[in-house]
Amino acid sequence: MRSGYRRRHLIIESGHGLVREIERALAAATLVGSLINGFRHDLAWFLLIGAAFGLYIVLADRALRRRIGPRHWPSEGFARFTFNTNLYFAVRNLLVGALVFALAGSAAGLVGL
């Protein structure tokens, strides 16, 4: 029984690290993509990155709720907190991406691209 607990604990911990790696990749893709698409003046980029963040939020929430299982009170509160944290992460990165997009578009317009 202890080995089953230990194996499940390691899976959860490795999943947590995977989530952080996905967050880093999304943040980097937002910055780089906003810079490139800002120079190209391509607004369709925000539909793609918005869909990527939306998918990330939904999949992370479902994975967490699947790990929680039927336990309700403290775990449900943690799931809500995590969902709101992921939502803040998405909105923050979209706003930073919009700022980078605007700056890159302005710089491209000044240079004449």
Image: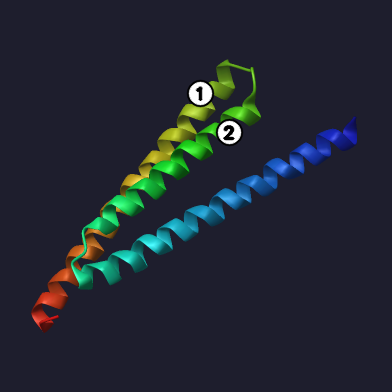
**Where in the figure is residue 14, as x and y percent of width and height?**
68, 49
Left or right for 5, reference 93: right
Q: Nearer the viewer, mark 1 or mark 2?
A: 2
Left or right for 28, reference 106: right
Q: Which residue is pictured at 45% across the width and 40% down the height?
A: 57
Q: Which residue is pictured at 14% across the width and 80% down the height?
A: 113
Mark 1 is on which residue type? Gly
Q: Which residue is pictured at 85% across the width and 34% down the height?
A: 4
Q: Which residue is mark 1?
A: 77
Q: Crowdedness of circle 2 by 10 Å Cα count: few (<14), some, many (20+)?
A: some
**Where in the figure is residue 79, as x and y percent of width and height?**
52, 29
**Which quadrant is home to the N terminus?**
top right
Query: Mark 1 or 2 closer to N-term?
Result: 2
Left or right for 69, reference 85: right
Residue 108 position (above or below residue 74)? below
The answer to whether the residues at label 1 and label 2 have Cβ atoms under 8 Å apart is no
> Among all residues in the image, which is located at the extreme bottom?
111
Residue 106 position (above or below residue 69)? below
Residue 16 position (above or below residue 101)? above
Q: How many marks?
A: 2
**Where in the figure is residue 61, as x and y percent of width and height?**
51, 34
How is the model colour-coded? rainbow
Q: Secondary structure at mark 2?
A: helix
Q: Residue 3, located in which quarter of the rendered image?
A: top right
Mark 2 is on which residue type? Leu
**Where in the figure is residue 101, as x and y percent of width and height?**
23, 64
Q: Which residue is mark 2?
A: 64
Pick the residue in front: 51 or 7. 51
